[in-house]
C-alpha cells in the first residue's frame, strides 16, 4: 500500500496546476489576437483557445477581459435569440 499510495499522492500533486499569473494587459492582448482570427468567440471557446496557448485562468478573469476588449461582441451574443426546434404533434390514437 505504501508504494501505490506514494505514487497516487505524487500523481495528484503533479496534476494540480495553479492558475496563471498573467497581467490584465497581456491577457487583453492575447484575447485581441484570438478575436482577430475568431471574431464570434464566446467565453467557453475562448477558455479553450487560451488553454491551447498554455494559459490556465479563472473563468471570471476571462469574462472580465472579454468585456474590456470586446464589449459590443459580448452584448450581441447575450442578446442573440435562441430559436428552439418546434416539434410536430403526433396524431392521437
Image: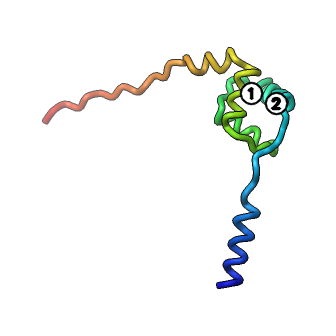
24 versus 70 height, above or below: below
Spatial separation of the CA atoms under disc 2 and disc 1: 7 Å
Label 1 sits on residue = 65
In which image quadrant can residue 71 be found?
A: top right
Are there few (<14), some (14-19), or many (20+) residues within 10 Å of tag 2? some
Residue 3 image position (x, y, % from top left): 71, 83
What residue is rendered at 25% in x and 28% in y?
89
Seen as rendered, the residue at the extreme left is 93
What residue is rendered at 86% in x and 31% in y?
26
Q: Secondary structure at mark 2?
A: helix
Along the line of sight, the residue nearer the viewer: 76 or 3: 3
Residue 83 image position (x, y, % from top left): 45, 22
Are there few (<14), some (14-19), or many (20+) residues within 10 Å of tag 1? some
* Residues at marks 2 and 1 touching, judged by CB atoms closer than 8 Å: yes
Along the line of sight, the residue nearer the viewer: 81 or 58: 58
What residue is rendered at 73% in x and 64% in y?
13
Colour scheme of this structure image? Answer: rainbow
* Left or right position of 57 against 29: left
Along the line of sight, the residue nearer the viewer: 73 or 11: 11
23 versus 67 height, above or below: below
Q: Secondary structure at mark 1?
A: helix
Amino acid at each position: 500500500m505504501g508504494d501505490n499510495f506514494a505514487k497516487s499522492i505524487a500523481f495528484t500533486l503533479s496534476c494540480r496546476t495553479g492558475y496563471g499569473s498573467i497581467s490584465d494587459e497581456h491577457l487583453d492582448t492575447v484575447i485581441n489576437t484570438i478575436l482577430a482570427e475568431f471574431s464570434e468567440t464566446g467565453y467557453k471557446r475562448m477558455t479553450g483557445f487560451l488553454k491551447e496557448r498554455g494559459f490556465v485562468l479563472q473563468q471570471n478573469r476571462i469574462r472580465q477581459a472579454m468585456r474590456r476588449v470586446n464589449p459590443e461582441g459580448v452584448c450581441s451574443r447575450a442578446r442573440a435569440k435562441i430559436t428552439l426546434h418546434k416539434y410536430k404533434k403526433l396524431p392521437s390514437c
